[in-house]
Image: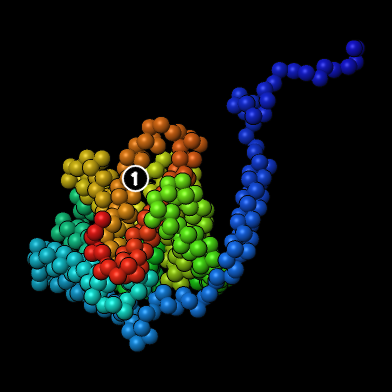
Amino acid sequence: MNGQQGCHHAQDSLFSSDSGFSNYRGILNWCVVMLILSNARLFLENLIKYGVLVDPIQVVSLFLKDPYSWPALCLLIVANAFILAAFQVEKCLAVGALTEQVGLLLHGANLAALLSLPAAVAFLVESITPVGCLLALSVYTILFLKLFSYRDVNLWCREHRARAGARAGAGWSPGACAPDPKPSALPGAPGGKVNGDAGQRVVSYPDNLTHRDLYYFLFAPTLCYELNFPRSPRIRKRFLLRRILEMLFFTQLQVGLIQQWMVPTIQNSMKPFKDMDYSRIIERLLKLAVPNHLIWLIFFYWFFHSCLNAVAELLQFADREFYRDWWNSESVIYFWQNWNIPVHKWCNRHFYKPMLRRGTSKWVARTAVFLASAFFHEYLVSIPLRMFRLWAFAGMMAQIPLAWIVSRFFQGNYGNAAVWLTLIIGQPVAVLMYVHDYYVLHHEAPQAGLPPLPPDAP
């Protein structure tokens, strides 16, 4: 054995946790290949069974029921009345023509009317379609959040001005009422551009109260108002072109997947629900989970990356943090804090922290945030469908006990797997619930010669 070396020494197998081995890239690639092959088989099976169902022209009917009636578009135009009302109230408050109490009352009435008008139109105007109504309600919801922020920031600025330049106090946010000493922008960007202007001057309250400033904020991809947003130095044409091409491609892809894959699956799910065949219901739920989740992921990229970056590039808006690494979420709370940054920033700045400053406990404040989110989810679903089932509301409120369960019993990779499981399974459950109720309300009852069920019937 002299001159020969032994071929054995103490070591752990690679799959053992004590081995320290962590390079599983090949297995990840294998999972991706298997995922592509399995979904390709499902896609071919769908084509063989149903043929080609994709019809881009049919999409027009989702927005227009009567070619001579455009209620959703009219709602978007009328929204300017609420914008100008909020602007005029702020102008009057800035010069002392109104007291803060009267201004609060006027803003509250304006915001309440802002949410009520599209809801009333949805129930009173027969020619508005569910998709057109959803679009209008989404715009009005975003406008509500933006005008709420606009009112808050200007109020903080008036309080700051009343304290004669003091930079500390309840409710005031650094950088909101005065120029940021170190403006953040894209590399090479000059800081401190006034909103809606390409200049480099900064603006202070009440010089920000202009139509140009307000409408720049309304079109900017953020829900939180500031007097001086970080600005990029120029519009990158190649970057903008890529984002626009992505928007067009993923729009067509989403429409095609919904028409070809989701619609037949949902239609075939009605009979198991009617017969209360639980095994078939579970099978349909799992079958719907794959296309639903894939479309949700495509929508996330389409909206939060392609659309918001395109708008930001056009407006030279430099804060491009529209999402964080929510896919690594090991808890439900981390997911909700990182998947939709514009909404998270708004909730944190205008809802959660103000409640904490008033002495509310963190648990109560978080519950209130989920309650508000649940309201808007139900608002955006029930009103276009003209029925109230509270599935979206219940789903959002269920996130509170779910967050506790995941954080208590699942850690690390197990927590991440639990979050993914709730995303994959939870959404198709809500989709099937609403589709089933909508089908019963609008199709089965009229076909049976019965009057349609009232919107709030169980």
Furthest toward the right, the residue is 2
Disc 1 residue type?
Gln
In the image, taking residue 332 as reference, residue 115 lies left or right, namely left
Vertical relation: 408 (above or below) 320: above
Seen at 26% across and 64% down, the residue is 453
Question: Which residue, given by chain and number where applicable, does mark 1 sit on?
Answer: 399
Name the element at disc 1.
Answer: helix
**Front residue (pair 65, 150):** 65
> Image quadrant for the C terminus?
bottom left
Q: Which residue sits furthest top?
A: 2
Query: Callout 1: few (<14), some (14-19), or many (20+) C-alpha neighbours within 10 Å?
Result: some
Residue placed at 47% from the left, 49% from the top?
280
Residue 359 spot, x, y in % from top left: 18, 42
Relative to 163, is 239 on the left or the right? right
Residue visible at 34% across and 62% down in the picture: 440
| Image quarter (top left, top right, bottom left or bottom right) of the N terminus | top right
Left of 286 or right of it: where is 40? right
